């Protein structure tokens, strides 16, 4: 039996009406969209930022639909109150002073009687196991917990369709996995139809039944997950291939005639039948890096550092760390292990309670986790420019980071990924010799990560970066340290770090670990299998 | 005592409206009774409440200011009021009278009682309970107030974050006062646009939760227990009683020109007895509960 179509979109187009300085500058967001959403499926909408994903998603719920000119039709047999939506920013979706009142809000607004409210509240909260969060203030929750609460609140009205707009883009990988596990349960146990957008598909690809790939306001591919993955691979364009999850990319590289893998396990089972053509060679850069670390002087010297926020517990305890001039150091570790605190101490925002942090840099730039606190001007251009600015560098940065489109926009109007680009450009323009980055890649496209790491390298500054992004660290860092329980557990050059780790490592290494631990990156697989 | 015991205290878990009525009674007493002896008993009750429910730390911290303000009131009354018949001595040719001293003491105790009562009030009727009380009468206002309550600390945190990030990233030069003010102006501008921008997202997320489309029905957070209703009726009846007493003129006290005797007689004695009984009711309640807990423990040990 064919699955029931819940929403059917026919020849839909959407144009935003913009008036800038008295002139109409309309922006086409969607053209020729034809899409059916079936009961019980998980549909993943992928594509680069600004391709119209969010507009498409929001058009599916009447209350969330953006303002503009709509053509074509969206037919839905589901009542709008049975469609729930969760947005990407965890900060703006909780509005009151306790989690309980936020959870009750949707039901209160719909005028459910007190008995139904209590019934749904108790069963939903028990199903998610978040009872201990109920009386907490939303500001004391982590980003992941906030997103789960938002999801839980939207489930109180028993929706049939759940719309998620980049729900995990602002979460760290561990919280992202927790969130996707919840989605899997909702779909498998309750049969809720889920439509979600995401531009970083690695974490959610194994959930999706179908994929829609969009580019420049059009649907380019749609179909079953593995078919679309193959279609994307066959485009032969590296910027499109970057949207493939790393495991799928590896499996298609090795053999493009079999269905693409979507989990490291599948890749692991698959590669048993294939023998590498070339031996992976140690990259020349790696040799260079080794020589750098021996000779150089220290930019930061931290000895026996202790720091505590409250009276109860030291966030950082007995930490020793040397940072060489010119190195690219990644600080890894789970949530609450003290990464951000350490960065704040290095930058001088916080002062150590016990111990010493000696720094010898002349110009420092710091990228906070919440980028809104970086911007003070009305446009990106104003934010970037300052007296005695290097004009050539300005031009080259705008070109390399594709900033032209957003130069005269207000920083708060940008998407999270665009904000990160703008912040980096501002930082690099100042020509610092020490750069601190707190989660710089949270909502970045893969191709952009490459550009950014190149720019950072060109600047010749010492870079210290706290990140959860294992692939980013493995690709571009020269050294990685593991922060655990407030101290540095171990420190190694990036390659060995991931080679020796078994769980906390890249998905390529997870798949290849028992066969050849040298495989850490997609490039290693490319080297070994020679792009057959 | 304090923070740790709060959660299992029977008075703490009372219905917000019962708690609200208790404080109505307490504040009415403080404002109505003029007898310094009664005010002293009320002040003691307020202090005990603050220590018991808000904890010793919070009590001492707030007391520093409260005592300072109280002392100022006392000093001002003595120095500025020259009414009264028994002059103690002359200060810069101005008479300092015994009556002004006693009235000053009464004023000080009244003011300090009000402020001390607010320490425990804030703990027992925290913002969510307080808003719950008014959400039925003023649903929209109380919701907006709740959002504002969430926003104030968030704004403060963001302001300090922004200032920290900007200070790291900008050139380290000594700025003139004018330039400093300019910088703070820029921070304020940035924070305001940040807030407004976020407000649009919040509005959208409220809209998708159907805010304002139906008549709001409140989530029933609290339920009246028999004990709540009993306590509530006691507090209400008592409040009514003292207002009637006040109208009949039984709660006044003469300070000037000659201070009356503090001694309580006849109806006033009854009035005082009832007041103390009602105002100290939370402690009686706690006492009975802890006795019960003790017996249960003993009984369990015996088994």
Image (cartoon, coloured by chain):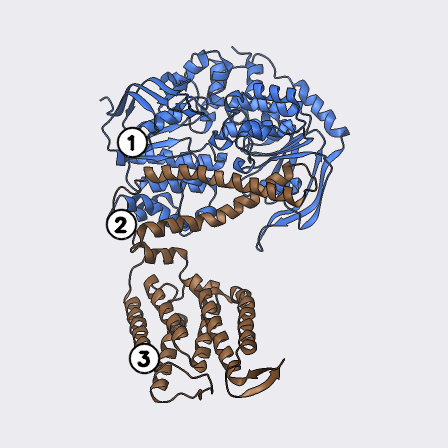
Mark 1 belongs to chain = A
A186 horizontally vs A478: left or right? left
Mark 2 belongs to chain = B
Q: Crowdedness of circle 2 by 10 Å Cα count: few (<14), some, many (20+)?
A: many
Query: Callout 1: helix, strand or loop?
Result: helix
Visible residue check, residue A516: no
Query: Callout 3: helix, strand or loop?
Result: helix
Visible residue check, residue B151: yes
Q: Nearer the viewer, residue B185 or B294?
A: B185
A526 horizontally vs B136: left or right? right
B251 horizontally vs B184: left or right? left
Instruction: Tell which tag, 3 or 2, sits nearer the viewer.
Output: 3
Query: Callout 2: helix, strand or loop?
Result: loop
- Residue A259 sits in quarter: top left
Where does residue B124 sit, x and y in percent of width and height? 41, 63
- CA separation in Å, label 1 and label 2: 23 Å
Tint applied to chain A in the drawing: blue
Q: Which residue is mark 2?
A: B217
Q: Nearer the viewer, residue A46 or A30?
A: A30
Instruction: Tell which tag, 3 or 1, sits nearer the viewer.
Output: 3
Tint applied to chain B in the drawing: brown
A324 horizontally vs B1: left or right? right
Q: Which residue is mark 1?
A: A62
Dot 3 and dot 1 within a common chain? no
Q: Quadrant of the N terminus of chain A?
A: top left
- CA separation in Å, label 3 and label 1: 61 Å
Dot 3 and dot 2 within a common chain? yes
Q: Which residue is mark 3?
A: B245
- CA separation in Å, label 3 and label 2: 40 Å
Where does residue A390 sit, x and y in percent of width and height? 66, 23
């Amino acid at each position: 039996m064919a699955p029931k179509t819940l929403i059917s979109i026919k020849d839909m187009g959407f144009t935003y009406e913009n008036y800038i300085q008295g002139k109409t500058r309309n922006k086409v967001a969607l053209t020729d969209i034809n899409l059916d959403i079936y009961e019980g499926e998980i549909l993943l909408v992928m594509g680069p930022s600004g391709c119209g994903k969010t507009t498409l998603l929001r058009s599916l719920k009447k209350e969330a639909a953006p303002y503009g000119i709509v053509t074509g039709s969206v037919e839905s047999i589901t009542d709008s109150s049975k469609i729930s939506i969760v947005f990407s920013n965890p900060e703006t979706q909780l509005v009151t002073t306790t989690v309980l009142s936020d959870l009750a809000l949707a039901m209160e607004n719909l005028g459910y009687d007190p008995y139904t409210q209590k019934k749904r509240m108790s069963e939903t909260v028990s199903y998610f196991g978040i009872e201990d969060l109920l009386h907490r203030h939303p500001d004391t929750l982590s980003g992941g917990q906030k997103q789960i609460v938002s999801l839980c609140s939207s489930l109180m009205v028993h929706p049939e369709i759940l719309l998620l707009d980049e729900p995990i883009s602002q979460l760290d990988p561990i919280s992202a996995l927790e969130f996707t596990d919840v989605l899997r349960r909702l779909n498998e146990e309750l049969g809720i139809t889920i439509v979600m957008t995401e531009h970083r598909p690695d974490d959610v690809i194994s959930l999706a039944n179908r994929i829609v790939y969009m580019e420049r306001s059009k649907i380019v591919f749609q179909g079953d997950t593995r078919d679309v993955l193959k279609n994307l691979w066959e485009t032969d364009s590296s910027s499109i291939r970057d949207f493939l999850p790393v495991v799928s990319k590896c499996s298609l590289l090795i053999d493009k005639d079999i269905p693409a893998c979507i989990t490291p396990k599948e890749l692991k089972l698959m590669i048993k039948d294939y023998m590498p053509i070339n031996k992976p060679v140690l990259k020349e850069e790696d040799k260079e890096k080794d020589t750098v670390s021996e000779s150089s002087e220290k930019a930061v010297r931290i000895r026996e550092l202790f720091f505590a926020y409250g009276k109860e517990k030291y966030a950082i305890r007995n930490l020793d760390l040397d940072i060489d001039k010119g190195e690219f150091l990644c600080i890894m570790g789970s949530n609450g292990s003290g990464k951000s605190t350490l960065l704040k101490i290095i930058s001088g925002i916080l002062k150590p309670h016990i111990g010493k942090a000696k720094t010898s840099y002349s110009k420092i730039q710091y990228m906070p986790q919440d980028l809104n606190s970086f911007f003070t001007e009305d446009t990106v251009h104003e934010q970037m420019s300052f007296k005695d600015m290097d004009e050539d560098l300005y031009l080259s940065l705008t070109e390399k980071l594709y900033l032209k489109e957003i130069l005269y926009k207000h920083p708060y109007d940008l998407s999270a990924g665009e904000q990160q680009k703008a912040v980096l450009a501002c930082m690099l323009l100042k020509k610092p010799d020490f750069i601190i980055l707190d989660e710089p890649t949270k909502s970045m496209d893969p191709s952009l990560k490459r550009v950014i790491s190149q720019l950072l390298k060109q600047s010749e500054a010492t870079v210290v970066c706290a990140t959860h992004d294992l692939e980013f660290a493995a690709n571009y860092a020269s050294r990685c340290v593991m922060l655990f329980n407030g101290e540095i557990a171990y420190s190694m050059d990036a390659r060995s770090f991931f080679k020796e780790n078994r769980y906390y490592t890249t998905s390529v290494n997870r798949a290849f670990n028992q066969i050849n631990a040298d495989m850490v990156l997609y490039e290693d697989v490319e080297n070994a299998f020679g792009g057959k | 005592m304090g923070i740790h015991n709060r959660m299992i205290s029977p008075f703490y878990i009372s219905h917000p409206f019962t708690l609200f009525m208790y404080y109505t009674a307490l504040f009415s007493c403080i404002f109505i009774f003029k007898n310094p002896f009664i005010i002293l008993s009320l002040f003691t009750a307020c202090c005990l409440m603050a220590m018991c429910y808000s904890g010793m730390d919070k009590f001492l911290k707030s007391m520093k200011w409260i005592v300072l303000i109280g002392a100022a009131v006392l000093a001002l009354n003595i120095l500025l009021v020259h009414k009264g018949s028994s002059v103690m001595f002359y200060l810069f040719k101005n008479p300092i009278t015994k009556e002004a001293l006693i009235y000053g003491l009464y004023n000080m105790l009244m003011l300090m009682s009000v402020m001390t009562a607010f320490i425990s009030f804030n703990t027992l009727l925290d913002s969510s309970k307080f808003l719950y009380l008014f959400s039925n009468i003023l649903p929209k206002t109380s919701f907006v107030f709740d959002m504002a309550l969430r926003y104030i600390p968030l704004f403060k945190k963001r302001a300090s974050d922004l200032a920290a990030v900007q200070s790291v990233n900008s050139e380290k030069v000594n700025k003139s006062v004018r330039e400093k003010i300019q910088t703070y102006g820029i921070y304020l501008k940035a924070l305001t646009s940040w807030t407004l921008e976020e407000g649009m997202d919040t509005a959208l997320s409220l809209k998708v939760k159907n805010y304002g489309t139906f008549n709001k029905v409140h989530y029933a957070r609290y339920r009246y227990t028999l004990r709540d209703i009993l306590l509530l009726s006691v507090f209400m009846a008592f409040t009514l009683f003292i207002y009637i007493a006040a109208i009949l003129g039984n709660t006044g006290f003469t300070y000037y020109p000659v201070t009356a005797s503090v001694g309580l007689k006849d109806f006033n004695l009854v009035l005082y007895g009832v007041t103390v009984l009602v105002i100290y009711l939370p402690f009686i309640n706690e006492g009975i509960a802890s006795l019960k807990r003790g017996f249960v423990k003993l009984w369990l040990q015996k088994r």
